[in-house]
Image (spheres, rainbow, N blue to C red):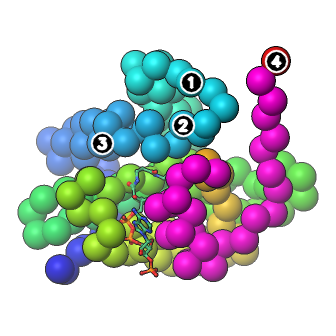
């Protein structure tokens, strides 16, 4: 396979198609990020993804789109002006990424991650960070194989 990664189109019909692709694939995959403690309905999780897209759109960010030939097969949302909240050290932050289910496990996620890291390096950002759900084995493996390490933990307890 010959996956290619590009930045989202800035204007015109391609920009609208890219945005629709991101929203549609994100809505379809968002249940992968739901852990074992909280049990939202699928519509609620999809609404949370829409809200995330709005939050990202309101900030400085870069959207990457992965292609296999003419087909869009994945995306990554990179926040590039969100310093680490504890140290205030600059970083890139991956708000969300997803790959079309039929293309998962073929290297698309790794290609998107590499493109985002290259862009962050070009901007002089010294770190890349992200949050991942404990039960999301595929995502955890992707990140661990790419060299990511646990820095903090999000703790949660049902009341
Ligand atoms: C997480 C996700 C983006 C990974 O993308 P992908 O294109 O499937 O990943 P790749 O094919 O590049 O695989 C990268 C590594 O992860 C491993 N991996 C991929 N899918 C896997 C799976 N289902 N189970 C276990 N390992 C998996 C691969 O073996 C590969 O390991 P390697 O580096 O040793 O070769 C994709 O599974 C996805 O879209 N999931 C739904 C949305 C999601 O969970 N997003 C993450 C939010 S934090």
Magenta segment: does it hold 152?
yes
Foreground: disc 4 or disc 2: 4
Q: Which residues are magenta?
A: 134-158
Q: Tell which circle, 3 or 1, labels the residue nearer the N-terminal end.
A: 3
Q: Tell which circle, 4 or 3, labels the residue nearer the N-terminal end.
A: 3
Foreground: disc 4 or disc 3: 4
- From the top left corner, tell me how far across and down residue 19 is, in percent: 29, 40
Q: Which residue was labeled with disc 4?
A: 159
Residue at 82 percent of width and 56 percent of height: 152
10 left or right of 90? left
Quarter, ligand 1:
bottom left
> Mark 4 and mark 1: span between their CA atoms?
14 Å
The image quarter in which residue 76 lies: bottom left
Residue at 76 percent of width and 65 percent of height: 150
Q: Tell which circle, 1 or 2, labels the residue nearer the N-terminal end.
A: 2
Foreground: disc 3 or disc 1: 1
> Mark 3 and mark 2: span between their CA atoms?
16 Å
Identify the element where label 3 is drawn.
helix
- From the top left corner, tell me how far across and down residue 109 is, in percent: 39, 67
- From the top left corner, tell me how far across and down residue 65 is, in percent: 31, 59
Q: Tell which circle, 3 or 2, labels the residue nearer the N-terminal end.
A: 3
Residue at 66 percent of width and 32 percent of height: 37
Identify the element where label 2 is drawn.
loop
> Mark 1 and mark 2: span between their CA atoms?
7 Å
Q: Which residue was labeled with disc 2?
A: 34
> Mark 3 and mark 1: span between their CA atoms?
21 Å
Residue nearer the viewer, 99 or 66: 99
115 left or right of 12? right
Q: Quadrant of the image for the C terminus?
A: top right
Q: Is residue 29 visible?
A: yes
* The residue carrying mark 3 has its beta carbon less than 8 Å from ligand 1: yes
């Amino acid at each position: 396979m010959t996956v290619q990664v590009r930045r989202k189109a800035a204007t015109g019909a391609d920009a609208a198609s890219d945005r629709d692709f991101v929203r549609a694939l994100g809505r379809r995959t968002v249940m992968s990020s739901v852990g074992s403690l909280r049990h939202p309905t699928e519509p609620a999780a999809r609404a949370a993804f829409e809200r995330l897209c709005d939050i990202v759109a309101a900030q400085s960010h870069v959207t990457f789109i992965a292609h296999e030939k003419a087909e869009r097969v994945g995306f990554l949302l990179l926040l590039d002006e969100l310093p680490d909240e504890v140290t205030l050290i600059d970083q890139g932050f991956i708000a969300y990424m997803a790959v079309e289910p039929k293309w998962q496990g073929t290297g698309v996620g790794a290609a998107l991650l590499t493109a985002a890291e290259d862009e962050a390096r070009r901007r002089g950002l010294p770190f890349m960070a992200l949050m991942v759900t404990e039960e999301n084995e595929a995502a955890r493996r992707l990140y661990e194989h790419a060299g990511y390490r646990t820095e903090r933990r999000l703790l949660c307890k049902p009341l």
